[in-house]
Amino acid sequence: MASTGTAHPHITKTPGVCGGVPAIAGTRFAVRSVVLYVLHLGMTVEELVRDWPHVSPAQVYDALSYYYDNQAVIDADILMQRRMVSEGRRRQR
């Protein structure tokens, strides 16, 4: 059986919104941000939804599912963001 990929109904890529990177539909909450909060900082989905009530658990879990389906792309985006922040800090010194 051929794989057709996983649908991600809560994730969109819209030019002009979050730089066109994958984000939770109808928000400016990038998938990379969900990954950073949940997987890197250890927030639970419940904590994230409590702190950002404009997103639902289903949206957050779909963002995580999107990440696992596109891990290399999202990881590269996170790395690029970190480099940009580091460069900005370096220039401020």
Image (tube, rainbow, N blue to C red):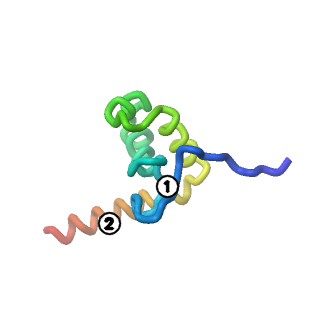
Name the quadrant containing residue 18. bottom left
Viewer-closest of 42 and 59: 59
Q: Position of residue 20 (x, y in %)?
A: 46, 62
Q: How many marks?
A: 2
Q: Position of residue 40 (x, y in %)?
A: 40, 43
Q: Secondary structure at mark 1?
A: loop
Mark 1 neighbour class, 10 Å CA radius: few under 14, some 14 to 19, many 20 or more: many
Viewer-closest of 74 and 12: 12
User: Which residue does the image show at 34% across and 65% down from the upper left?
Assistant: 83
User: Which residue does the image show at 65% across and 46% down from the upper left?
Assistant: 7
Instruction: Name above or below for residue 74 compared with residue 34.
Output: below
Mark 2 neighbour class, 10 Å CA radius: few under 14, some 14 to 19, many 20 or more: few
Q: Using residue 86 as the reference point, say whether residue 33 is left or right of it.
A: right
Q: Using residue 85 as the reference point, say whether residue 81 is left or right of it.
A: right
| Screen quadrant of the C terminus | bottom left
Indicate which disc residue 22 carries.
Answer: 1
Q: Amino acid at mark 2?
A: Met
Which dot, 2 or 1, sits closer to the camera?
1
Measure the C-alpha gap from mark 2 to mark 1. Answer: 18 Å
Q: Residue furthest bottom?
A: 91
Q: Using residue 13 as the reference point, say whether residue 6 is left or right of it.
A: right
- Say which label, 2 or 1, has the lower sequence index: 1
User: Which residue does the image show at 86% across and 47% down from the upper left?
Assistant: 1
Q: Secondary structure at mark 2?
A: helix
Q: Amino acid at mark 1?
A: Pro
User: Which residue does the image show at 70% across and 50% down from the upper left?
Assistant: 5
Q: Which residue is mark 2?
A: 84
Q: Residue furthest front?
A: 26
Indicate which disc residue 78 carries.
Answer: none
Q: Position of residue 44 (x, y in %)?
A: 41, 31
